[in-house]
Image (cartoon, rainbow, N blue to C red):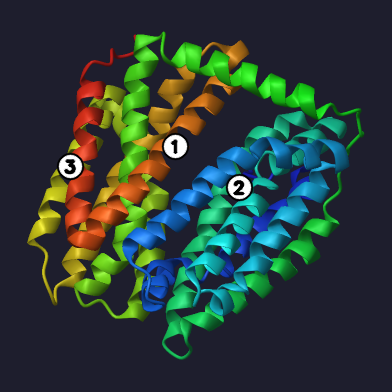
Amino acid sequence: MKFNFFHKQELKLLWPFYVFTFMSGFVMVVMPFLVIYYQGRGFSLFEISILWSVMALVRLISEVPTGVIADVFGRKVSAVSGFFLTSFLWIFVPFVSYSYWALLILMVLLAISQTLITGALDAWVYDWLKHNKQKKLISNYYTKRPALALSGFIIGPFIGGLLVTFVKIDWLFFIEGIGGSLLCLILLLFAKEHFKRKKYNTKQKFHQMVQTTKKGFSFIFSENKFKLMLVASVSFAGWIAVNELASQPFLKDLGMPISYLGFFFSILGIFTAFAPFLGNLLAKKIGEKSVFILSALGIFLLSLLVIFTKQPYYSVGATLLILMWIAFFVQQPAFRTHIQHLLPSKTRATILSAESMLESVVYAAIMVSSGFIMTIFSPKVGLVIAGLFMIPAILSFTFIKEKK
């Protein structure tokens, strides 16, 4: 029996998107060192947390205004501009990072450029496949894009770890910025688009967004089953915020060489790539509810163990972080599927949009709060406290009824 990874017409129509997604991971060399780089510029974790919180809020506010560009000028124009600007702006970080306010302005511009991509890329692909009567391939695209992105991302941090051994972190910004910009121009410009410009009413679009958001929140606060899942989702968002800020300085404090951070994130990517598949198997064996509870409980207990880590045993701290992220990704497929089953099809997108908005606000608030706490105490304390977010998640999962 012959097995084809790509379906008929799939590569012909989608190859620029697939290659760009995979190759983008190769140039993502800065992320493993970003927090400690800013610390090296003299910024506290509290100041860094403000940068990322502002970015999260700017992305939230900019969604509709930047969406106008995609609807008026085309999804390709919006997505390509967004990818190019997001990559290109990284080049300026080493020059402006000596001034906190200059860096803050740059982060705002980065966040705005990122919203040019959000929604536009998916709409571009969807309309292109629909135009070619291959709408059935959209599910293949959504399945393969994360796998290709993760495969590339495993390689990117590893390359970053090798480069940091020989050059300053400043150079990684140039590599990611120039590499990402060139990839965007070379690959995405080859991708075709089917777009028909329509009359656009900005005021009507904004009014529609407000009404959509109201409907989403109305459902969220009226359905008890969804509220339980939302509490868990927000709890995970808080935990993620703390981990994104604390992980790098935590490992550095334990004595991990800076170059090893790149290798750590590559290893983390490998393990978390397999975690969702493990989660699907466990859900079939012991049920979704058990997977949810065990996942949150595992993160909680592992977070408590962080308090016992000390120099020079950075490998212990790295192992605990990897196990926590595995526990998180184990429950993700079943978690997102369970949420989908709770939503009415007509308002699914509306409700998920409202959920995303709420998570963004919580993420920003907890990011700033944790940055303040970790500046006073330490990243280790922040990671331990982050585990406490799993308590409301565990309680919420306990009251969830299994699907029959």
Q: Does 168 sit above or below residue 255?
A: below
Sequence-first tag of 3 and 1: 3
Residue neighbourhood size for the residue with mark 2, other residues' Cα within 10 Å, grouped as few (<14), some (14–19), many (≥20):
some
The location of residue 299, given as percent across then percent down, is 22, 44
Residue neighbourhood size for the residue with mark 1, other residues' Cα within 10 Å, grouped as few (<14), some (14–19), many (≥20):
some
Sequence-first tag of 2 and 1: 2
Residue at mark 2: 145
Residue at mark 3: 300
- Residue 361 disc label: 1
Cα gap from disc 2 to disc 1, whole angstroms? 27 Å
Q: Secondary structure at mark 2?
A: helix
Q: Which quarter of the rendered picture does the N terminus lie within?
A: top right
Q: Is residue 16 visible?
A: no
Residue neighbourhood size for the residue with mark 3, other residues' Cα within 10 Å, grouped as few (<14), some (14–19), many (≥20):
many
Q: Is residue 248 left or right of residue 306?
A: right
Q: Nearer the viewer, mark 2 or mark 1?
A: 1
* Contact? badges 3 and 1 (CB < 8 Å): no
